[in-house]
Amino acid sequence: MTVSLDRARAARVFAVIRARDGAGALNAVESIVRGGLTGIEITYTTPGAGDALAAAADRYGDAIVLGAGTIRTPAQAREAVAAGAEFLVSPGLDDGLVSAMRATGAVTMAGALTPTEVMRAEALGVDLVKVFPASLGGPSYLRSLRGPFPDTPFMPTGGVAVANLEEWFGAGAVAVGAGSELCSADDIAAGRFDDIEARAREYAEALA
């Protein structure tokens, strides 16, 4: 767990991939990796997500930090880890689901927005708190959360763009999730993989 958590922190930017099929998800992964990012989250809103995770794990191995997002059932959590996911992300907090996610041994991230939800996430043993949807409050909201929770590792997701990346990290994020701003489902479906690669490169350069 410690090694995987360190790898998750080191990736810093996670591309949140919501595709209409597994092939599209894999093509998006390829474009993102070419662009210089290593954090990959394939969501379970993608049909065949488990197969896509297994294919990405087989193709890239330790060269990427691979995880599964939009985990809503214990069965999805188990399938994702069996396919090669190092981390699991749920959009919200559910006691039984978080327990099942933790039981897999993968890094566990769960969505929270309010201080009450952050406290619940910590009590449940979540490794990273996914601030979602982070676009509602922006970096200033995350900065406010850091007051009562100075040691909590936060990963804002939603509204994370190249233009505000530095601001998010300055507000205290240990990592961020970039979804439609980086690789939208429409771009994937339309085959605009060169555009996705170019945006990934912009994120990578902003990190550097």
Image (cartoon, rainbow, N blue to C red):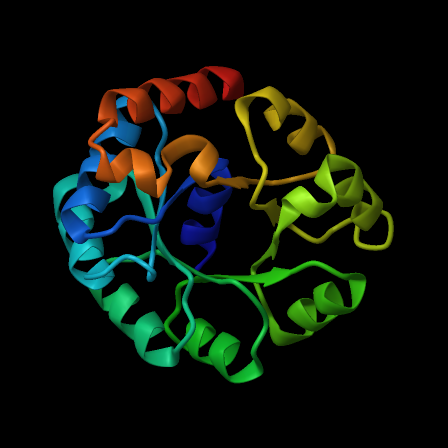
Q: Is residue 88 shown above or below 174?
A: below
Considering every residue shown, the one lying at the far bottom of the view is 96
In-front residue for pair 104/132: 132
Residue 40 lies, in percent from the top left, at 35, 43
In-front residue for pair 24/39: 24
- Left or right of 139? Residue 1 is left
Which quadrant would residue 46 be assigned to in this image? Answer: bottom left
- Left or right of 177? Residue 39 is left
Q: Is residue 176 shown above or below 206?
A: below
- Left or right of 32? Residue 150 is right
Q: Is residue 140 visible?
A: yes
* Residue found 74% across the figure and 44% down from its top: 137
* Residue found 65% across the figure and 31% down from its top: 169
Residue 179 lies, in percent from the top left, at 45, 41
In-front residue for pair 191/2: 191
In-front residue for pair 82/48: 48
* Residue found 22% across the figure and 67% down from its top: 82
Q: Is residue 170 shown above or below 186?
A: above
Residue 187 lies, in percent from the top left, at 30, 33
* Residue found 42% across the figure and 62% down from its top: 70
Residue 83 lies, in percent from the top left, at 21, 62
Q: Is residue 29 visible?
A: no
Q: Is residue 84 shown above or below 204?
A: below
Quick one: quadrant of the N terminus? Answer: bottom left
Which quadrant would residue 17 be assigned to in this image? Answer: top left
What number of labels is visible? 0
